[in-house]
Image: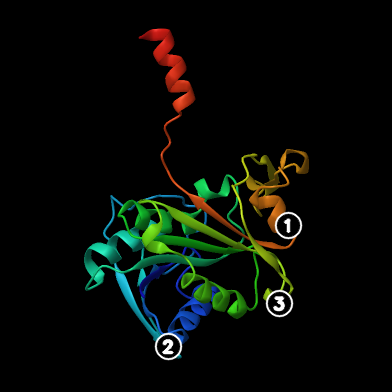
Amino acid sequence: MNILLANDDGIQAIGLRALYFALKEAGHEVHVVAPVTEQSAVGHAVTLALPIRVKQFRENGFVGQGVYGTPVDCVKLGLSTLLDRKPDLVLSGINAGANVGVDILYSGTVSAATEGALMEIPSMAVSMDNFNPEDLSGQARFCAELLLRIPWDRLPRKRVLNLNFPNCPIGEAKEMVLCPHTRASYDDVYDTRQDPRGRPYYWLSGAIPPGRISPDRDRALLTAGHITLTPLHFDFTDRETLTVLKDSIS
């Protein structure tokens, strides 16, 4: 396959590098267009008011193009300008930190894949349930093998596959489960601190309360040690409310 590889952790992130080498080893043609700096949780942001610059990276067998912009900038620029031909697949990851439930709205990783899907290219986002992974080579090889099992030509248009690995070595992960995403939201907590000059600042944390997490959805299954795969689409129309409004105000 001819693959456009992006992420939101930055072009030097170990997840992207692991995926790059695993894909190359599997015989794929890989074109990396990824942010120069970390762009976690920027969602589907696009750069409009500033020029976008590109830096070439060649080191230790790795070749890629670093973009001074967002993950979506990378995919847009790659598909429209930097690549010589349309890729067969847009792949984003491997992200440090799971992207389950409401994370899919915040995630630059998922947004990069979503941009590919919106341009009608098969797309997948890949994440690991660990914010500080040290070795993702096993997860990268699993992903490279999985790509060959997915019937890309039979999937509906404008879909994203969202793959998440549990926080354990790949050899200890439980079988992959196809599942819906978690619908519960976070309880946000802002830790209030002071800088050296006595001025307050705030640091976001928080978690999804366990009681809100459905056992058959991605967050619970990932915590239980399963690899999860969730197909996503981004038709935001609320058809139930649309029917209510039609009955009420038509």
Q: CA distance from mark 1 to mark 2?
A: 36 Å
Secondary structure type for disc 3: helix
The residue at 71%/69% (across/down) is 173
Q: CA distance from mark 2 to mark 3?
A: 29 Å
Q: Nearer the viewer, mark 2 or mark 3?
A: 3
Neighbour class for label 1 at 10 Å: few (<14), some, many (≥20)?
Answer: some
The residue at 34%/51% (across/down) is 118
Q: Earlier in the sequence, mark 1 or mark 2?
A: 2
- The percent coordinates of residue 167 (x first, y second) are 70, 66
- Badge 1 is on which residue? 223
The residue at 44%/46% (across/down) is 233
Q: Are marks 1 and 3 in contact (CB under 8 Å)?
A: no
Give the amino acid type for the residue marked by disc 1 in the picture. Thr
- Badge 2 is on which residue? 59
Secondary structure type for disc 2: strand
In-image side of 148 versus 102 (left or right): left
Depth check: 155 or 59 in front?
Answer: 155
Q: Earlier in the sequence, mark 1 or mark 3?
A: 3
Neighbour class for label 3 at 10 Å: few (<14), some, many (≥20)?
Answer: few
In-image side of 36 versus 204 (left or right): left
Does residue 191 appear in the picture of this structure?
yes
- The percent coordinates of residue 81 (x first, y second) are 22, 66
Give the amino acid type for the residue marked by disc 2 in the picture. Glu
In-image side of 34 versus 164 (left or right): left
- Badge 3 is on which residue? 171
Q: Earlier in the sequence, mark 2 or mark 3?
A: 2
Neighbour class for label 2 at 10 Å: few (<14), some, many (≥20)?
Answer: few
